[in-house]
Amino acid sequence: MSVQSINTALEKLINVHQTLLNLSQEKTVVLKNGNLDQLQTLLVRERKQIQVLQKMETNRVEAVNNWFQNNDAMTEEQTISNLLEKIKDVSEKEKLTNLTVALTQVMLELKQQEQLNQALVQQSVQFVQLSLDMLSPTLKNMNYGNNQSAGTTNRSVFDSKA
């Protein structure tokens, strides 16, 4: 099996990650606007892309495994560094290096975008929690002051002596 199959798998992974990055950027806009219906449809689209990503990653792993088997290098750890050391053709090595760098960059951008989305969601949750706390009265506020006499004790609704 040639390096070309690994390159093809990496190109497909880059495309899927780019699609996920675009969806993540759309999600940021939707989160800022607070449109839950659009967010829900985006999450469904994102889930589908993640399934495609998992399939593409499985294909990449198979291609790398096949390459290592065909080149009698199964004793080594199957990493991109070891693969690059074994490749003799300079143009193949350069193309594989470029694809690996491109995939890493897209993955890093996606990670940063998702961290931004996570921060936006956390802020939204904090805002909702603060709003609920302000709206729900506490026991102290229900009585408008300290009118309880000193001799009364807090009792349960049910008498436990029965």
Image: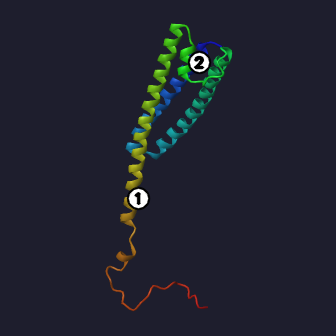
Q: Which of 75 and 102 is in front in this view?
A: 75
Q: How many labels does the image show?
A: 2
Task: Examine the image and state in which quarter residue 8 appears.
Answer: top right
Residue 155, given in percent of the width and then of the height, sits at 48, 86
Q: Residue furthest left?
A: 145
Which mark's residue is nearer the viewer, 2 or 1? 2
Residue at (40%, 56%) from the top-left corner? Answer: 128
* Relative depth, front residue between 100 and 137: 100
Residue at the (47%, 41%) spot, across then down: 38
Q: Residues within 10 Å of mark 2 (few under 14, many from 20)?
A: many
Q: What numbered label is drawn on residue 49?
A: none
From the top left corner, tell me how far across and down residue 118 is, in percent.
Answer: 43, 44
Q: Disc 2 designates what residue?
A: 6
Task: Depth check: give the residue in front, 90 or 151.
Answer: 90
Instruction: Give the residue at x 57% y 18%.
Output: 83
Disc number placed over residue 129 in the picture, else none? 1
